[in-house]
Amino acid sequence: MSTSSQPQFRYTQTPSKVLHLRNLPWECTEEELIQLCDPFGKIVNTKCNVGANRNQAFVEFADLNQAISMVSYYASSSEPAQIRGKIVYIQYSNRHEIVNNKSPGDAPGNVLLVTIEGVEAGDVSIDVIHLVFSAFGFVHKIATFEKAAGFQALIQFSDPETASAARNALDGRSIPRYLLPEHFGSCHLRISYSAHTDLNIKFQSHRSRDYTNPYLPVNPTAMDGAMQTAVGPDGKKVEFQSNVLLALIENMQYAVTVDVLHTVFSAYGSVQKIAIFEKNGATQALIQYPDIPTAAVAKEALEGHCIYDGGYCF
């Protein structure tokens, strides 16, 4: 028997052929859900990895009696429902079928349309928007733009439930003052559901990000003060100093990661941003420091050196 203080069942709910399962293992698969529920009847639909922690799911049986059978079995069993050794809490869902509703407005979707009132583009960075909304779950993509309604952003989550949790918590609220420029007052968020389900992000930039694809090409405007070059009198390229370094990573024996680069470059100063991308078949990275002198010290120290013996070479 479970000794948990959290009840495995709620008896006050009206029976439904859709069951709500909680406390699932992280990234629980559809196959694992079906394996747990299949002995009680035919599964016609599932919805996995929902909720802010992605540890909930919905399972829809073909018949109401099949769902009642599963709830009744585990309610009277000495062994609780488990997946990967974790106790799964089961209850009837308030919904009577699983519907993937993609209509806009108030119909839940996985993409939010956020209007940030009282600001202009550039007043609130995409990094601040990501920080605020990622408190409710993994943010897949963000695209910002200006419309007649003002400065807006599309924010894509993995599922409507996570998006709904963010909307319910933030609609009508303000971005915390400590994340805003000093001269700003409050800026209110107006949030609705978008008709989009998957944003098409072609570049990482100061206006758009795809957090699921670290190898997406970087738009030159992705970082302020990106390295500029000019042609000198002798016909050779002359580099202007910048607070952003462009690193060409050669002789890689293992896949390079942002964490590895951050560890190496932060030894010479505070690293503000890092972006990795592929260009002309080579792996490159942009590393942004707060000022030019710090970037110059890092460039002098690291150019031509290896991270590991026989490993990455800049």
Image (tube, rainbow, N blue to C red):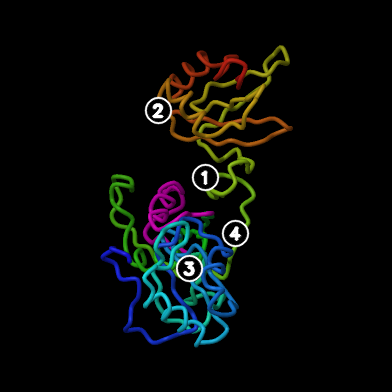
Q: Residues within 10 Å of mark 4 (few under 14, many from 20)?
A: some
Distance Cα–Cα, label 2 vs label 3: 41 Å
Among numbered discs 2 and 3, the one appearing first in the sequence? 3
Which mark is in front, 4 or 1?
A: 4
Q: Residue furthest left?
A: 5
- State the image coordinates of residue 110 (x, y, percent, origin top left): 51, 66
Residue located at (61% from left, 52% from top): 201
Residue type at numbered disc 1: His
| SS of the residue under disc 1 | loop
Which callout, 2 or 1, points to the residue nearer the camera? Answer: 2
Which residue is at the front of the view, 8 or 79?
79
Give amino acid for label 4.
Answer: Leu
Q: Which residues are magenta?
A: 113-141
From the image, tell me which residue sits under label 1.
Answer: 206
- Residue 99 drawn at (x, y percent): 55, 78
Q: The residue tagged with tag 4: helix, strand or loop?
A: loop
User: Label 3: which residue?
Assistant: 57
Residue 287 located within the stretch drawn in magenta: no
Q: Earlier in the sequence, mark 3 or mark 4?
A: 3
How far is disc 3 from disc 4 in space, using C-alphas? 24 Å
Q: Answer with mark 2 or mark 1, whichever residue precedes in sequence.
A: 1
Crowd band around label 2 with a 10 angstrom C-alpha radius: few (<14), some (14–19), many (20+): some
Q: Which mark is residue 199?
A: 4
**Residue 170 position within the rendered picture, expressed as x and y whole percent measured from the top left:** 35, 63
- Which of the image's four quarters has the N terminus? bottom left
**In this figure, which residue is indicated by the disc labeled 2?**
270
Label whose residue precedes the other's in the sequence (2 or 4): 4
Quadrant of res 92: bottom left
